[in-house]
């Protein structure tokens, strides 16, 4: 069964098993490897993408539910919030190993689109479930605050 969706502004038709996780369509079919596989259980956030503007864990999202959806991966992220987050991230050296960063950035951008001046509580809520093995949480929070000032 062919499933049609839009990924990073490009119309995509995929003919995979409908229960295939969106993550594997993004990585294997589209060769967009910025979205990472972490835990496979929607617990770590490494696979976070935007679906119709909302964050979604792609590792547990069957592609059959994506028919007609707009999906944005880290490769397609753009706009003033994305630019501000990317600048803030590099400005204070948030990434260490970098594995979780695409999911962290996707969640941070989604937060700033909804809450332009987030409180610590807003940040904690939005970033909950994005695990960083290097424990750069203090820098992540600061980078989000710095980005909010630029938006």
Image: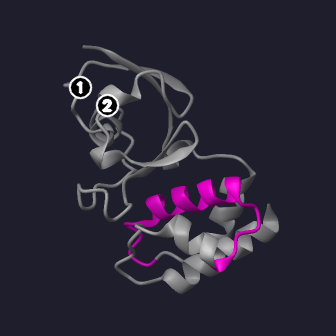
Label 1: which residue?
Answer: 18
The boundaries of the magenta stretch are 96-120
Quadrant of the rendered structure where residue 150 is? bottom right
Q: What secondary structure is marked by label 1?
A: loop
What's the residue at 71%, 62% (across, down)?
A: 84
What's the residue at 61%, 76% (across, down)?
A: 121
- Does residue 16 appear to the left or right of 101 in the view shown? left
Tell me if residue 4 comes above or below residue 123 in the rendering. above
Label 2: which residue?
Answer: 63
Tell me if residue 147 comes above or below residue 29 in the rendering. below
Asked if marks 2 and 1 touch (Cβ < 8 Å), the reply is: yes
The quadrant of the image that shows the N terminus is top left
Is residue 107 rendered magenta in the image? yes
Quadrant of the rendered structure where residue 116 is? bottom right
3D distance between C-alphas at marks 2 and 1:
6 Å
Tell me if residue 38 comes above or below residue 13 in the rendering. below
Is residue 18 rendered magenta in the image? no
Q: Position of residue 72 (x, y in %)?
A: 52, 40
What's the residue at 31%, 31% (across, down)?
A: 63
């Amino acid at each position: 069964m062919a499933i049609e969706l839009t990924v990073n502004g490009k119309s995509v038709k995929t003919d995979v098993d409908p229960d295939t996780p969106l993550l594997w369509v993004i990585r294997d079919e589209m060769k967009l490897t910025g979205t990472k596989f972490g835990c496979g259980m929607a617990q770590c956030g490494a696979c976070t993408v935007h679906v119709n503007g909302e964050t979604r864990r792609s590792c547990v999202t069957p592609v059959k539910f994506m028919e007609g959806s707009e999906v944005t991966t880290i490769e397609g992220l753009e706009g003033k919030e994305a630019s501000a987050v990317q600048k803030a991230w590099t400005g204070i050296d948030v990434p260490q190993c970098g594995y979780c960063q695409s999911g962290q950035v996707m969640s941070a951008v989604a937060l700033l689109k909804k809450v332009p001046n987030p409180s610590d509580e807003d940040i904690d809520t939005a970033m909950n479930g994005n695990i960083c093995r290097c424990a750069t949480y203090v820098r992540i929070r600061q980078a989000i605050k710095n980005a909010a000032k630029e938006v």
